[in-house]
Image: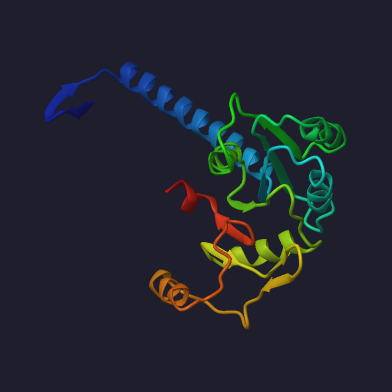
Amino acid sequence: FIVYKAGEAITVSPNQVGRCIKIFINFLNFDRIVFIILTKFRKNMPQLSIIIPLFNSCNFISRALQSCINQTLKDIEILIIDDKSKDNSLNMVLEFAKKDPRIKIFQNEENLGTFASRNLGVLHSSSDFIMFLDSDDFLTLDACKIALKEMKKGFDLLCFDAFVHRVKTKQFYRFKQDEFFNQKEFLEFLSKQRHFCWSVWAKCFRKDIILK
């Protein structure tokens, strides 16, 4: 038998060919095992990750967590990023986590702020879709189900309505109708808005877009 390697012909015996074939078949089997493991891992991944930065929010965190736990979409993970809370917030979250394995808690070694805590939450997340929730906010029951359904149509970003409770008034961020934009069109849309919810909450993101 003659094989070619780096531009030169090499003569090999039938026994050597047999060993090469055996090694190649073993490699294929290993590759198949790895593929099966990865496939099973993806099947166990949550469909959506909710990231909640936490800092001294003992008056609100129970409501926020309960709204996540009660979602009609059950296949989610709830990531709490504790930013060195000094009140009882973390202990409250730990009690919730004992009852619901979907709640995962991560603690910053020092106070990093909300933005950095959200970024760390993204890195710890397991799903392809991300929603951010502040610890003093809460979700309506079908929020995750509706957001995921729309995102699976191929969108990179979904913006949805939100109530904002202020001291004296309630302001409602509402889109008049469903609209679809490419990147250029979306930027043009934003440039014309007098009132727009610029925060990352009230939105659902594709994770790979965030990581870029």
Count the numbered circles shown.
0
User: Looking at the image, which residue is at 73% across and 37% down?
Assistant: 56
Residue 98 image position (x, y, % from top left)? 85, 31
Furthest toward the front, the residue is 168
Q: Does 123 sit above or below residue 132?
A: above
User: Looking at the image, which residue is at 59% across and 36% down?
Assistant: 124
User: Looking at the image, which residue is at 61% across and 28% down?
Assistant: 108
Name the residue nearer the viewer: 145 or 176: 176
Furthest toward the left, the residue is 8
Residue 201 located left or right of residue 168:
left
Residue 212 image position (x, y, % from top left)? 42, 49
Image color mode: rainbow
Q: Does 15 sit above or below residue 29?
A: above
Residue 84 located left or right of residue 200:
right
Name the residue nearer the viewer: 175 or 179: 175
Is residue 4 visible in the rendered structure shown here?
Answer: yes
Q: Please identify the quarter of the rendering in which residue 100 is found.
A: top right
Name the residue nearer the viewer: 168 or 192: 168
Is residue 152 visible in the rendered structure shown here?
Answer: no
Residue 20 image position (x, y, % from top left)? 36, 22
Residue 95 image position (x, y, % from top left)? 86, 32
Residue 70 located left or right of residue 163:
right
Q: Does 96 sit above or below residue 65?
A: above
Q: Please identify the quarter of the rendering in which residue 165 is found.
A: bottom right
Q: Quadrant where the N terminus lies? A: top left
Q: Please identify the quarter of the rendering in which residue 71 is found.
A: bottom right
